[in-house]
Image (tube, helix red, strand yellow):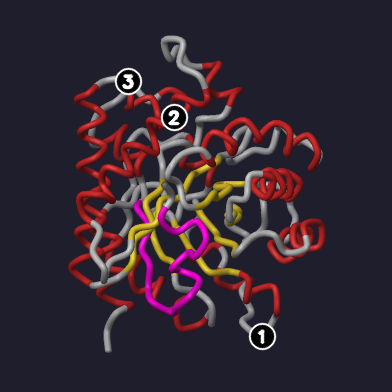
């Protein structure tokens, strides 16, 4: 049974929540896996890889316990939607079984580590149908709702507490994901990715994207996030006096300041500067009144998240 689906704790207080992050880059560069299409669910195939992934994710919970902050654990399902599953030889597994196994992994971690002071939210991750950096597959909102329904319906029948559309690069797909989540009574968040100019890969501003989704869905998303971009790429577009900025509650920044195109060509891991990463998050925490969810995306690990906790929990 989902524990927090009807009362997400990150919404009911200003307590800091951290997010597990950087899983795909950790599997590739630290575990040494050949991860097809950046699909973390591929690591569920082998028991040894599954155990490595479980231990890696659990380290973020231990950081949360150390600093007495909440934890949002993401399911390794960013690529666990129909088109991407069909591209990968997964021995006959389907959308339902893959997403269920992914949630079971995270639920095992929650059962082992959760305490009253450190709530652990299971976040069912839904990635884009196309490339996360390049919107070559562009759907209408109706098409996106139909497409993403299979995965979101599968996640709704697990212990996942919520859905988040992650690394989305155009608003119509976000609208479809939000509507599909509503149909199965799942709270949903939307996370857009941004280029070095602070705009979506489509050239739209973040303001335009958030307002388009809110207007089309009557503000269905419980909040918005930004992920897979360094904070220096977008901090200049976040004016805390503008109402749309108040809808942003979470940031999952990249460790690297490189562009998406540069990261795509990287053969070595750019893990940036964890201390600077934490300090950048602290600046955003003080700047954005509703921000209380911080974590990392590509290239980050527990060092980045711990430096964020150090910087953001100082009295």
Q: Residue furthest front?
A: 1
Q: Residue furthest bottom?
A: 315
The vertical placement of 68 against 302, above or below, is below
Query: Pointer 3: what residue?
Result: 45
Q: Look at 60% across and 55% down and name the residue there.
A: 190
Q: Look at 69% across and 73% down and name the residue there.
A: 244
Quick one: label 1 or label 3, which is nearer the N terminus?
3
Query: Pointer 2: what residue?
Result: 39
Q: Assess whether mark 2 and mark 3 are in contact (beta carbons under 8 angstroms).
A: no
Which residues, given as a range, are shown in magenta? 3-20
Judge left or right: residue 120 versus residue 186. Answer: left
Please state the horizontal and vertical placement of residue 307, each as a whole percent of the image: 26, 68
Judge left or right: residue 163 versus residue 97. Answer: right
Main secondary structure found in the magenta portion: loop
Q: Which mark is residue 241?
A: 1
Q: Which mark is residue 125?
A: none
- Secondary structure, mark 3, is loop
- Which class describes the residues within 10 Å of circle 3: few (<14), some (14-19), or many (20+)? some
Magenta stretch holds residue 177: no
Q: Is residue 195 visible?
A: no
Q: Quadrant of the C terminus?
A: bottom left
Q: Look at 69% across and 59% down and name the residue there.
A: 220
Q: Assess whether mark 3 and mark 1 are in contact (beta carbons under 8 angstroms).
A: no
Quick one: label 3 or label 2, which is nearer the N terminus?
2
């Amino acid at each position: 049974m989902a524990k927090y689906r009807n009362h997400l704790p990150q919404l009911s207080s200003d307590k800091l929540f951290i997010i597990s992050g950087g899983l795909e880059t950790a599997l590739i560069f630290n575990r040494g896996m050949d991860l097809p299409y950046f699909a973390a669910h591929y690591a569920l195939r082998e028991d040894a890889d599954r155990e490595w992934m479980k231990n890696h994710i659990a380290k973020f919970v231990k950081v949360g316990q150390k600093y007495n902050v909440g934890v949002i654990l993401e399911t390794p399902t960013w690529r666990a939607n129909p088109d991407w599953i069909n591209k990968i030889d997964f021995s006959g597994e389907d959308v339902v079984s893959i997403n269920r196994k992914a949630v079971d992994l995270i639920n095992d971690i929650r059962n082992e580590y959760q305490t009253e002071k450190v709530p652990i939210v299971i976040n069912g991750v839904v990635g884009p149908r196309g490339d996360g950096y390049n919107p070559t597959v562009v759907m209408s909102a109706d098409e996106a709702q139909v497409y993403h329904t299979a995965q979101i319906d599968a996640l709704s029948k697990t212990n996942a507490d919520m859905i988040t559309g992650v690394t989305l690069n155009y608003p119509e797909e976000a609208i479809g994901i939000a509507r599909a989540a509503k149909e199965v009574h799942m709270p949903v968040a939307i996370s857009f990715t941004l280029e070095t100019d602070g705009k979506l890969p489509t050239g739209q501003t973040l303001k335009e994207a958030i307002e388009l989704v809110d207007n089309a869905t009557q503000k269905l998303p419980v909040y918005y996030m930004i992920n897979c971009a360094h904070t220096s790429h977008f901090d200049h577009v976040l004016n805390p006096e503008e109402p749309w900025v108040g809808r942003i509650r979470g940031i999952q920044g990249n460790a690297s300041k490189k562009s998406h195109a540069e990261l795509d060509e990287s053969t070595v891991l750019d893990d940036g500067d964890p201390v600077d990463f934490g300090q950048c998050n602290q600046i955003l925490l003080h700047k954005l009144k509703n921000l209380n969810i911080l974590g990392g995306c590509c290239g980050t690990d527990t060092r980045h998240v711990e430096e964020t906790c150090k910087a953001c929990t100082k009295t």
